[in-house]
Every structure is written in C-alpha cells, then in structure tokens.
Amino acid sequence: MDGPAQESCRVERTYTFDPRGVGAAWHRELDGLAILERILDGRLPMSPIAGTLDFRLVEAEKGRVVFEAMPAAFGYNLAGTMHGGYAATLLDSAMGCAVCSMVPKGRAYTTTDLSIRYIRPMTEASGLLRAEGRIINAGRRVATAEGRLYRAEDGKLCAHGTTSCLVFEA
C-alpha cells in the first residue's frame, strides 16, 4: 500500500445527553424563546445532537442565537479536516433556533431547506467556533434564517448558510 505507514490506533469517545431532548410537548406549553432561555439556564436539556457533536447554546434573543463548539478529531474526514456535515449541523441548529426564538406557544418548526457555503477548513487548530443564526423572515407557516460559522479567536468565516423552516401546530 502506498502512503505513510501507520500503526493501528483506536480512540474511544463517550458522551452524555438527555434523551428527552426538547420535543413538541415543550412547544405546546412555551413559546420558542422561553424554551431557549430554559435551555440556557439548565432547566431544559439541549437536543441529543448537541451531545453527539459536543456543541452548546450560549446566547438566545428574539431572532438571534449563538452556539459554540470546539472541533475535534472525531469529526474529521479523510483529508484531516472537519466533515462538512459538522458545519452544516452547527448552522442548521443556529438558524433553526433563530426561527425557534420567533415561534409562538403552540407552534413548532422543522427545516425544509438548507444551503451551506464552505469558506475555509476547520480543524482542532481552528479553536473555538461560533455559529450565529439570525432570522430573515418569520411568517406564520414558513420562516427563513441565515447563519455564519466563524472562528471565535479572529472572527474568520468558515461557512455560512440559509434555511427555510416549516412552522406547524405542535
């Protein structure tokens, strides 16, 4: 086989998450911003995907949210950079939660369209990443948002995207 010789190496990774996540039941009792505020203060759990990819909600206000994440080797592709799905998931979460922040009690949302543009690769050396989602339009049945994923240290853009979400009765 051509290429560098490598010894077999196996790394185990464990993580925890609350399997209750946040579901439609919460949306029947609270508006979207109240759900996000309860996640921030620890009264509600993050969704299980946040535990899987090790990211967390750090800011939430009407029409805007921010997640933080630290890239790690568990998310690398064959080129030794973070898999594109990692950036897509962070941006989908940020943009979706920007929509969530606008959703009234009794309504929930789901992504119907996601478009991501990749600007620069991410690795562990990139340091802390911030994914910021902002609402573009919050309609009764369809909402749109935009997002930016950037390095916290220097603000350099890694990826950006847009989404459309269906807003439905919870």
Image (cartoon, helix red, strand yellow):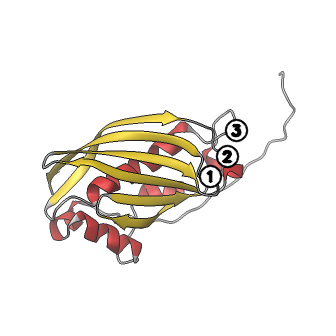
Question: Within 10 angstroms of label 3, few (less than 14), some, or many (20 or more) residues?
Answer: few
Taking the image as shown, residue 44 lies to the left or right of residue 55, namely left
Numbered circle sitting on residue 123: 2
| Image position, residue 71 (x, y; %) | 62, 52
Tell me, yes or no, if residue 94 can be seen here: yes
Q: Amino acid at mark 1?
A: Pro
Q: Is 64 in front, or is 10?
A: 64
Q: Residue at x 23, y 51 (%)?
A: 109
Numbered circle sitting on residue 80: 3
Q: CA distance from mark 1 to mark 2?
A: 6 Å
Q: Nearer the viewer, mark 3 or mark 2?
A: 2
Question: Within 10 angstroms of label 2, few (less than 14), some, or many (20 or more) residues?
Answer: some
Q: Is 121 in front, or is 3?
A: 121
Return the residue at label 1. Answer: 71
Q: Residue at x 23, y 59 (%)?
A: 102
Q: Amino acid at mark 2?
A: Thr
Query: Are the residues tagged 3 and 2 within 8 Å (C-beta)?
Result: yes
Element type where label 3 sits in the image:
loop
Element type where label 2 sits in the image:
loop
Q: Residue at x 33, y 41 (%)?
A: 163
Taking the image as shown, residue 114 lies to the left or right of residue 170, namely right
Q: Which of the marked residues, 3 or 2, is nearer the chain's N terminus?
A: 3
Q: Residue at x 48, y 34 (%)?
A: 117
Element type where label 1 sits in the image:
loop
| Image position, residue 160 (x, y; %) | 46, 41
Query: Are the residues tagged 1 and 2 within 8 Å (C-beta)?
Result: yes
